[in-house]
Amino acid sequence: MKGLQCPKALFLNVYKPRLKTPFSAETKALMTDGRKFEATVREAFLPAIDVSKTLGPKFAAYAQFTKGCLAKEGDLTLFEAGLEHNKVLVLVDMLKRIGNCYELYEIKRSTQLTPSILNDAAMQYVVAKNVLQAPIQSFVILRVNEYDYQITDISQAVASLAPSITAEIEQQLQILAQGKEPLIATGPQCNSPYPCDFKNYCAGLLL
């Protein structure tokens, strides 16, 4: 969630995305590796509906398409399910419905459960709780090694983060509604937990 790392990054991502620095070769390689890991995990949860394969970059349509899938009866599994509440759209790596209950899965190539992963999962939980209006469990799937992964139940952790994440969402929506770029100097947030896409712009390196 960009706004947690830096409100300015969130603003720029919404209003001035053209200012992003292109991904480096190293970053592209990590992204490719992450997609390969996610594809490996998905094989264990078939059959499923892959929303991203159906809609591609048409993100504005994800929530409505997902709603249509969930309107059907029976258990189901969705990859990249789109859920939207209060102008916040989240894409859930894997959403499972079993009976009247739902399971959210965050799939990460990381070998460690980091605060940023928990925050991402908590954001998804907050939105899903409002959209689905049903019992929800949250899980994270992390890499063990090149061939194996482990599934960890993080339901209690994300539920405890929900109040602070909800407050953060409200604050970020206010920043976006103002339509004015926040005045935030460069600092440690430019590289933690991830290198920011707008770091060069904020450092005055873009012509």
Image (tube, helix red, strand yellow):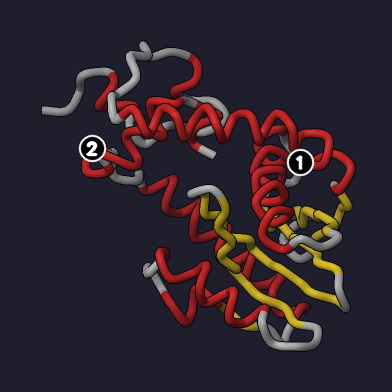
The residue labelled by disc 1 is 112
Residue 150 visible to an observer of this rendering: no
Q: Earlier in the sequence, mark 2 or mark 1?
A: 2
Q: In x, y percent, where is residue 166?
A: 65, 35
Q: Amino acid at mark 2?
A: Leu
Would you say 178 lies left or right of 52 here? left
Residue type at numbered disc 1: Gln
In the picture, residue 133 is in which quadrant? bottom right
Q: Position of residue 162 (x, y in %)?
A: 75, 37
- Mark 1 crowd level (few <14, some 14–19, many ≥20, 10 Å Cα): few
Report helix, strand or loop for mark 2: helix
**Foreground tag (2 vs 1):** 2
Tell me the quarter of the image containing the N terminus: top right
| Residue beneath disc 2 | 19
Q: Nearer the viewer, residue 68 or 153?
A: 68
Reply above or below: 32 against 3.
below
Task: Name the secondary structure under disc 1.
Answer: loop
